[in-house]
Image: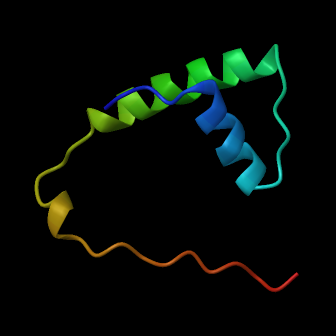
Amino acid sequence: MQDLTKDEVQGLGHAVGLEIQDPELTEVAYSLNALLEALDNINPPGLDQVEPLPILLPPS
């Protein structure tokens, strides 16, 4: 998996209501990319056959 750029991380943050600015943006991008890499290594057998569940948020 290719690392997310700072612009992509900033866009993801904006999508969930977070404004991430430098110097925190560099640290957040690094941490998020490390987390995604670690999660990519977790691949239990049969995971590709499980249907994802929708995320239901309570009304605000």
The residue located at (76%, 82%) in the rendering is 58
List the single residue furthest toward the bottom: 59
Residue 17, given in percent of the width and then of the height, sits at 83, 54
Residue 32, given in percent of the width and then of the height, sits at 56, 30
The image's colour scheme reads: rainbow
The residue located at (69%, 16%) in the rendering is 26
Say if 30 sits above or below 46 in the image.
Answer: above
Q: Is residue 20 left or right of residue 47?
A: right
Q: Quadrant of residue 20?
A: top right
Q: Is residue 1 left or right of residue 24?
A: left
**Image quadrant occupied by the N terminus:** top left
Say if 13 sits above or below 21 in the image.
Answer: below
Q: Quadrant of residue 6?
A: top right
Residue 54, given in percent of the width and then of the height, sits at 49, 78
List the single residue furthest toward the front: 7
Say if 41 sits above or below 60 in the image.
Answer: above
**Image quadrant occupied by the C terminus:** bottom right
**Of residues 5 and 32, the one drawn nearer to the viewer in this rendering:** 5
Q: Is residue 16 left or right of residue 46?
A: right
Residue 57, given in percent of the width and then of the height, sits at 70, 78
